[in-house]
Structures are given as structure tokens and as C-alpha cells.
Image (cartoon, rainbow, N blue to C red):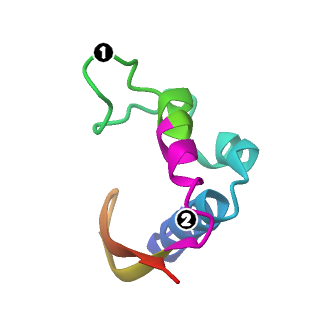
Amino acid sequence: MTIEGNKAVVRQIEEAWDSNDLAALDDLFASNFVSLSSLPTRPPNLQTAKRRIGCMQAFSDRKAVIQDMVAEGRSGRRQDTNDWD
């Protein structure tokens, strides 16, 4: 996949989180995804990430805004903020 293609996937992931379309994430993450931000007592997988982000849905007006995205080869980084109206 191209760098621009990878950036498009990141945008799709943020849109899925924002719209609470957690089922869409299954197609956007690799089956062997490992979360580096899981609590030590929880498995570092997509299901745990979905539960954690699902808690944020209590704030129905929350929207993630991507401020910056940099990608090169297989590495990338994004900077975002959460916006509440």
C-alpha cells in the first residue's frame, strides 16, 4: 500500500471511532494487531481497544481532529486532538 493509502486508512479508522462504527474496524486492522496503549491487566488486542474507545462514546459530541500526519515507508505518526462542542 502507498503512503497516501496508509494515511487514508488512518482517516477511515478515526471516522469509524467517531461514528461508533466499531464493526468497521475489523476490516481496517490486521488480525494480529497489538495495542501499545492497553492496560497491563488487559489483552493488547483490537477488542480491548474497542472497549476502551467505546467508553469515550459516552461523550456523544466528541470528534477526533487529525492535526498532522507523517508517513514514510512502513512507519507513520499522527497528531490529533479531541474536540467537544
Image quarter for residue 79? bottom left
Three-letter code, disc 2:
Glu
**Residue occupying image coordinates x 37% and y 35%:** 35
- Asked which quadrant contains residue 39, the reply is top left
Number of the label disc, if any, that sits on residue 67: none
Dot 2: element:
helix
The N terminus, quarter of image: bottom right
Rendered location of residue 37, percent (x, y): 29, 39
Q: Is residue 49 magenta?
A: no
Q: Is residue 61 magenta?
A: yes
SS class, disc 1:
loop
Q: Nearer the viewer, mark 1 or mark 2?
A: 1
Which residue is painted at 67% across and 39% down in the image? 26
Q: Position of residue 73 (x, y in %)?
A: 32, 63
Residue that lies at the very extreme toward the left in this rendered image: 40
Q: Nearer the viewer, residue 65 or 25?
A: 65
Upstream in sequence: badge 1 or badge 2:
2
Pinpoint residue 36: horizontal percent, then vertical percent.
28, 37
Relative to 64, say whether 38 is above or below: above
- Above-or-below relation of 57 to 42: below
Residue placed under numbered mark 1 in the picture: 41
Question: Residue shown at 25%/20% (left/top)?
Answer: 40
Stretch in magenta? 52-63
Q: Is residue 36 left or right of residue 34?
A: left
Residue 80 rendering spot, x and y as whole percentages: 35, 74
Check disc 2 and report the residue beneath it: 14
* Distance between the alpha carbons at the discs numbered 1 and 2: 25 Å
Query: At label 1, which amino acid type do we have?
Result: Thr
Q: Are marks 1 and 2 in contact (CB under 8 Å)?
A: no
Q: Is residue 30 left or right of residue 78?
A: right
Instruction: Characterize the local packing of mark 2: few (<14), some (14-19) or many (20 or more) Cα atoms within 10 angstroms.
Output: some
Of residues 52 and 77, the one nearer the viewer is 52
